[in-house]
Image: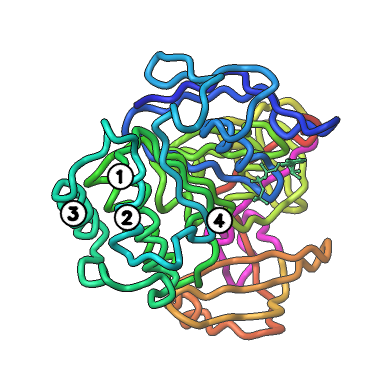
Amino acid sequence: MSIEISNITKSFDSFKALSNIDLKINTGELVALLGPSGSGKTTLLRIIAGLETSDQGSIIFDGEDNTGKSTQDRKVGFVFQHYALFKHMTVFENIAFGLKVRPSKLRPGKEAIEKKVHELLALVKMEELAKRYPAQLSGGQRQRIALARALAVEPKVLLLDEPFGALDAKVRKDLRRWLRKLHDEYPITSVFVTHDQEEALDVADRIVILNQGKIEQIGTPEEVYDNPANPFVYNFLGNVNLFHGRVHNGKIELGSLKLDAPEHTETADRNVVSYIRPHDMEISLEAGENGFIAANIIFIRAVGPIVNLEMKRIDTGEYIEAEISKEIYKKLMLKEKQTVYVKPKDFRVFIPEDY
Ligand code: ATP
C-alpha cells in the first residue's frame, strides 16, 4: 500500500511540532524517519497511524483518503520501543492474540490460526520459543516476537517506533540487518522511526531527515550521505570538520590552503564554510606545495583497521578529526604531539548566509 502525506501540520498549544510535511511512500518501501529528539518523528508516525489528528493536511492510503479514519480502520501494524507483549501469555498466544480477538465473521479457525502463527515463528526464526513466556526471552527475541505479532493480522502498513531503541549496541546491529532481510522477503510498506543515523543508513530504502518539524531532505542512504542538501544534514549524518574560508577567483581559500572550488559552488567572492568528513582528510609529514594546514596531533586511537586522529590547527586553534588506514598510520609513524599537515581530499561548501 502506498502512503501519500500532504501538507501535514500539527501544533501542541502554540508549539509547532510539524510544519507542512509532504511525503510519498511507495508500496513495499521501507522508509526511515530520522532526526534529533523532538524533531517530530513520533508525531508524524502517530498521525500516519491515526493515533493523533493533524491540524491540516491529508493522509492517503492507496489513493483513498484516510485522514479522518480510526486506527482500527487503517490496516496498520505497530512495533514500539518497549515490547508490549502480554506477560501472562506464551509467545504463541501473543502472536495469535490479534487473530483471536477479531470479530467472529473475520476470525480464522483454530487450525488456520495455528498455521499462521507457525509461519510467523518461522519467518522471525523463533520456532523453538513458542511455549516460552516474555520474561524468558532476551530483549532482541521479544522485539522479534513483537514484530511477528504485528504481522499476524496482515497489516498493509507496518509502523515501527524506535523498535530497537532499548537494546544494546550489538543486538541492535544484528536486529537491523535481520529486519532489512526480513523486509526483502516480506516487503510490506514500512515506516521506521529512529534517531540513530547508522541504523537509518543501514536499514532504509529511503531516509526522511526531520529537524524542528520540517523535512530537511528525502533520499536514499547514498543520496543523503553523499549529497547532503544543507549543513544540518551533513552534520547529522556523521562527524564533520568545519573550515571557514572564502571563495575567490574560482578557488576556495581556507587559510593558506587554496583549493579548486567544487562544481556546486558559486564563484562569487564570498565567505563560505567547508564541511569535510574525517575519512576525507589526507595527512602528510611535509607542507605540500598547495599549502597544507599545519596541525598538532593531540590524540590517536589506533584500535582496529581505521586510526582516528584528533589534531589542533596551529593557525586557528580549531580541532580537526581524521580517519586514516592503519597502513598509512604505520608508514608515517605518527605520534601524539607531532606536527602534521592536513588537506581535504573531498569536501562540500555551504554559504553561511543561506542558513
Ligand atoms: P524523540 O526522538 O525524543 O522521541 P521525536 O522526534 O519523536 O523525538 P516527537 O515525539 O514527535 O519528537 O515530539 C515533537 C515535539 O512535539 C516535541 O517537542 C514534543 O515535546 C512535542 N510533543 C509531542 N507530543 C506532545 C503532546 N502530546 N503534547 C505537547 N507536546 C507534545
In the image, what residue type sits under mark 1?
Leu
In the image, what residue type sits under mark 3?
Glu
Q: Decide: is 234 above or below 126.
A: above
Could you tell me how far apart the alpha carbons at marks 1 and 3 are, in whole angstroms?
A: 10 Å
User: Are discs 4 and 2 less than 8 Å apart at CB?
Assistant: no
Residue at horizontal 78 percent and vertical 33 percent from the top: 12
Chain-order first, disc 3 or disc 2: 2
Could you tell me how far apart the alpha carbons at marks 4 and 2 are, in whole angstroms?
A: 28 Å
Residue at horizontal 53 percent and vertical 46 percent from the top: 193
Between residue 177 and residue 88, name the one nearer to us: 88
Quadrant of residue 125 in the image? bottom left
In the image, what residue type sits under mark 2?
Ile
Quadrant of residue 274 in the image? top right
Could you tell me how far apart the alpha carbons at marks 2 and 1 are, in whole angstroms?
A: 8 Å
Chain-order first, disc 3 or disc 4: 3
Name the mark on residue 57. none
Name the mark on residue 99. 1
Residue at horizontal 62 percent and vertical 32 percent from the top: 52
Q: Furthest-front residue in view?
A: 104
User: Is the residue marked 2 within 8 Å of ligand 1, measured from its CB?
Assistant: no
Could you tell me which secondary element the residue under label 1 belongs to?
Answer: helix
Could you tell me how far apart the alpha carbons at marks 4 and 1 are, in whole angstroms?
A: 33 Å
Residue 270 appears in the picture as rendered: no
User: Which residue is the site of mark 3?
Assistant: 114
In magenta, the rendered stretch is 271-293
Q: Position of residue 207 (x, y in %)?
A: 49, 40
Name the mark on residue 95. 2
Q: Decide: is 204 above or below 140.
A: above
Q: Position of residue 134 (x, y in %)?
A: 41, 70
